[in-house]
Amino acid sequence: MRFRPLHLLLSALVLSMTARGAEPDAGGWIDRLHREQRIVADEDGRMEKRWRAFSADLPVFADWLRQDLGDEASGILLAEREAELTRRLVEKLSATESAPTLQTYLRLATERREKRIAGTLKEWGPIAFTEGHAYRMSFIGYTEGLSDARNERFFQPGARLSVLDFSNDPLFGTTKVLIDDPRGMMRDVDVSFDRGKLLFAWKKSDRLDDYHVYEYNVEDGACRQLTEGLGRADYEPVYLPDGGIIFTSTRPEQSVPCWWTEISNLYRMDADGRNIRRLAIDQVHALYPQLMADGRVTYTRWDYNDRGQNFPHPVFSMRPDGKDQRAFYGGNSWFPTSLLHTRGIPGSHKAMAVAAGHHTHQQGKLVVLDTNEGRDEGRGMSFIAPRREHPYERVDRAMQDGDQFRYPFPFSENEFLVSCRMEGGKRFALYWMDADGGRELLHASRDLDIARMVTLGRRPEVKTIPEEIDYSKETGTYYVKDVYQGVGLEGIERGAAKKIRVVALDYRAAGVGMTGNGGEGGGALNSSPVAIGNGTWDVKRILGDVDIEDDGSARFEVPAMESIYLQVLDDKGQVIQTSRTWDTLRPGETKGCAGCHDKTNGNQHPYHPEETLAWKRAAQKLQPFHGPARGFSFPREIQPILDSKCVSCHDGADPERMDLRGLPVDDADTNQRRWTRSYLNLTGAERSDRGDYRADPARGQVNWISKMSRPTEIPPYSAGAARSKLLEMLDAGHEGAELTTVEWDKIAAWIDLLVPFSGDYREGHAWSGREMAYYNYYEGKREVGAAEEKAMIAAHLGLDRPAEKLPAFTTARYRDAWEGIPVDVVDGRPAAPADAPRWFVDVLRLASASGERPELVIRDVRKGGVLATVPAGRESVEVALANPARTDGIVFETGGHPASGIVVESARGVRLDEVPVVDGYHPFLDIGESR
């Protein structure tokens, strides 16, 4: 029998829709219980094991017992306790029943289930969901599982896309498997507005595929791939009411500042997967986009510019086209540590979310957010399931005890679906719940966890907000009504604030070297550091500044699609207050705010003409900072000032005087940056026991805001140039040194930008050749992605530009090698046609030409090592290789000799020329000689 390629088998599986039935009837439950009692009686000490088996076979019955008996539920397996526990079970559900039997309890529990779920599931069901292994990672966001991951990644094969249908069995339903992939992973299901299609993300191979967005047709089972490319993960897709799709992706090709792992940002595409465009330039992760009733999109944004990274994980909101990005909840909070899986409550301004930690998995406690009551520090946040008070806390690994929740899907403020792992349980299961903690188990899998779910009978109504991006524009416009309004400038006299400075953030492509950091906001490393420990996280460019009007208002243009933040300056060009976050304006966008860190909902201020001075003139253009915008570099901006005004005395000759020469420090350090003596001495940096240079921002000649500052607001003038002894000394005419205005401005800016050293991530590096190749690889992929989007915008505007040839990895798809044509093995080698491309493969299907297949050892002769050992047999066999291997390096052996007579019926992988390569480098695949 010839083997059919895997994609055909999957299609057949989809169309067959394998069903799993409901639990047995009451009689079957009771018979099974009594059988377990006999086993427990015969096998002393085995009750815990038998309870696990009983719970796996009869999950609904077992969950009822846990609800009604708590920790004593397993005691029902002891025959001598059956009567006592049965009486308690019946009494809990009815005060009038006279027959305390198990049959009575099961009838009452069934009636309770019907009352709880029958009406809701009739209206909203069926329920579609994905099944897979729960992600295990060091931080809530690292779920990408990227094929060429910079550092940690999670891949554990085994996945299903399933539907739970209640049409034939309104209480227990029937689960149908739509797609079953034992070698891949699936996640993030969503349903179209006509409820006829499902979006989900699917990763079919560990190292030769990534998460891509697929669309499944509910009526005919057809499944099509919408996004593609090797070395880029697209996941968390959501249908938009106008037909577009928003999703999360690693396409930015950035790595987190505080570790080594890639980040993901939000993108939007058309319904057919075309015209992919980025919605924001975010420093780190933006996750789990979902629609609110008003048509806006909520998402979790990790947010730590110039502050510690452990606590700021607020919920943000924006229009579906990326405009009007604003903090929705938790923008300046210690508590809760993070908010995940936020979904709007139908017909309400409220949302349901999971309160969790930082160094945790994506799981925690359920909360309802009411932004009319507050937006920070637990105000306006209520814990549910059950309703209760929760103490205010500042904890990294928060909310990880007891029952754990993920992916709430609210029907109302009181009723919802959720993925839950009960305390002591092994896997997440699908539950109906209410806010008081009442629950009914709907589906539990023996081998996989239940993840995100959606309903197919009804979906929440959502307002349509049209896309309104003018891609012909290169700028956007801000309007600040009054910088003195809000806590940011609290106590500052009117007239003291003179200018608003606009600073752009540039982000690293990968991490090389590190420095340690610590402060009020926690501790962290900083990879590819551009400053000593506790200095700035990222490269910064001053784009310019604008005047603040006498009434505190300002209106000004900024470049679109830049990650920017604002600083309020005094008459000396020193920072009064700085926004320790960032923002992105879309092309042509206009945006308003009430003031500086206004804590009320009034900060959601519209952009429209009003009686302020800013509206009596045209929007201001940015005034450059002493030349074109550039990464702020200590060697280029500050060292020339020191050479001109200071080094004649501070030349290193006198040990009592600070050495301000720009000589690189040549001792090896884990920063892998060639700091200069002047930089280390001015910042007061010292070498730690770990070999990196760190400084205390509050000690020494220079005072700046620590990158590990607290997540909540800081007072004006809390630190910075205005609080630095250095400028105070220079202002007083130290040793006759007189600074020009330009020199003063540069030194003040350097301090207020958190003492950057490097103006780009390569400046002053001490990287090896391999480390440079590693960094160039990810930066090269970033440049390709930018070129793709640029070409899309040009096509959208109808510009006549020559098409740019993009690398093949951008369209790579995991598929059958050699176009699915079987290949014979001759003298141990697959005898592919001479003109056939070479492939990387990781799954083979083997048969024997003679009908009897000998025992085989499959080796990789290019990299060495055994890829698989295959036992003898007559049937075709599918073999997963230990690592991806090039087809020109695979050798089949039997008995230590080259094998022949074997047929490779199919192989799965990608062509060699579809692997992303920059300057001949790939992080782990064997690219070798010419491709």
Image (cartoon, grey):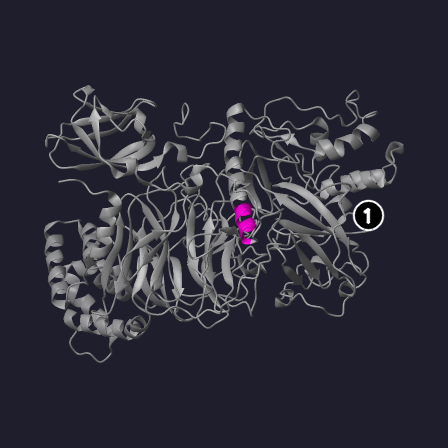
Q: Is residue 228 visible?
A: yes
- In-front residue for pair 860/793: 793
Residue drawn at (42%, 24%) of the image? 930
In the rendered image, which residue does mark 1 sit on? 572
Residue 30, x across and y down, in percent: 13, 64
Q: How many marks?
A: 1
Tell me the magenta residue range: 789-796
Q: Is residue 550 magenta?
A: no
Residue placed furthest toward the right: 736
Q: Determine the main secondary structure of the stretch shown in magenta.
A: helix
Residue 245, x across and y down, in percent: 45, 57
Residue 750, x across and y down, in percent: 72, 40
Q: Is residue 703 visible?
A: no
**Callout 1: SS:** loop
Amino acid tagged 1? Lys
The C terminus sits in image quarter: top left
* Residue 909 horizontal side relative to residue 76, left or right: right
The N terminus sits in image quarter: top left
Q: Quadrant of residue 557?
A: bottom right
